[in-house]
Amino acid sequence: MYFEELKTGMQVQIAPVTVQKEEMLGFSARYDNVPLHTDEAYAEQTHFGQLLAPGMLSFLLIWASYLRQDFFGEELLAGVSQKVEWHKPVFAGDVLNGTAEITALTDRSPKNGLAQLTITACNQNGQPVLIAVTECIVKKMPYRFYGWQTATVPNISGTMEAVTTPQKMYEMLRKIWCQYTCAPRLRDKWSPENPTLGQCSITAFLVQDLFGGKVYGILRPGGNYHCYNVIGDAVFDLTSEQFGEEILCYENNPEQFREVHFARQEKRERYEYLKAALQEALSRS
């Protein structure tokens, strides 16, 4: 899953895994060669009364089971830190199971974010034996809109300074575009899976507010114009994803003017709503 798709509180159940004595002995001999893990006679004289599984083996067994259904998949870029707390001893024959939960998300850069994963493992009696907290760098969704490579022009408005580039605006608007901001004629087709549908003109003029340049329109069947932005040599279209695999022509199109578009009250109101929602999102962050 991409970073934007993760939510705190997401959980998966970890399939049970049995601690095998032979695996305990082999792991201990190589990585944790102390009598409590390798010498049965010694272990029987301790208050445990039997061989104790190495703590790292217990963690690695449950971690391997988690990886069969992990959240991140190919979007995992790297691990950053790992903290494990052990709460109960683990012995041969114990059956470990548990849950993995996303417990924190931190925006790290335009390309990735930091996800905190907390694993709680229990034995067959329901007793927690360990809690592990892992921080992972997770890839963000690649930009999918036309001209994303050039959508790096600076904010020149003196407002909403945190919206540093059109790429950053796109990231934020993906969480704001909604059925209400969609053009009325397309609202019954809008969905969170297709968030840019019917958002072109109000988005393009909002981009113009912060980054300058001009708005142009591609004539569509039915007589409507699909709007996009041109700023210097940068040509980009934050809402192009709605057309799927269709290839649009971004050359020799007429300039669009907000006075014309906003003569329609419903469009002005949608634009003002989108702008206010962006400002509110900035104030929360």
Image (tube, rainbow, N blue to C red):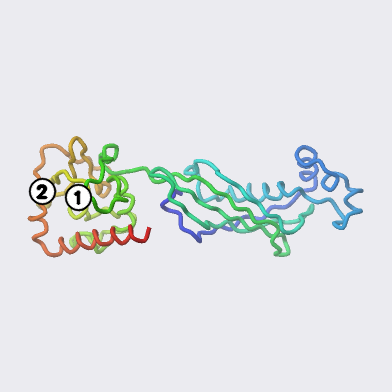
Q: The disc labelled 2 sits on which kind of residue?
A: Gln
Name which of mark 2 and mark 1 comes first in the sequence. Answer: 1
Mark-to-mark CA distance, 2 and 1? 10 Å
Badge 2 vs badge 1, beta-carbon distance below 8 Å: yes
Instruction: Name which residue lies at 65% across and 56% down.
Output: 131
Q: The disc labelled 1 sits on which kind of residue?
A: Ala
- Residue matched to label 1: 204
Numbered label attached to residue 91? none
Element carrying mark 1: helix
Q: Is residue 195 left or right of residue 225?
A: right
Instruction: Name which residue lies at 26% across and 37% down.
Output: 150
Which residue is the extreme one toward the top?
A: 233
Instruction: Name which residue lies at 44% across and 44% down.
Output: 139
Location of the C terminus by quadrant is bottom left
Percent x, y of residue 1: 46, 49
Q: Quadrant of residue 14?
A: bottom right
Viewer-closest of 260 and 185: 260
Percent x, y of residue 136: 53, 46
Q: Residues within 10 Å of mark 2 (few under 14, many from 20)?
A: many
Numbered label attached to residue 256? 2
Q: Residues within 10 Å of mark 1 (few under 14, many from 20)?
A: many
Element carrying mark 2: strand
Percent x, y of residue 152: 28, 40
Which residue is the extreme one toward the front?
A: 158
Q: Is residue 92 above or below residue 264?
A: above
Instruction: Name which residue lies at 68% across and 54% down.
Output: 85
Q: Is residue 13 above or below residue 215?
A: below
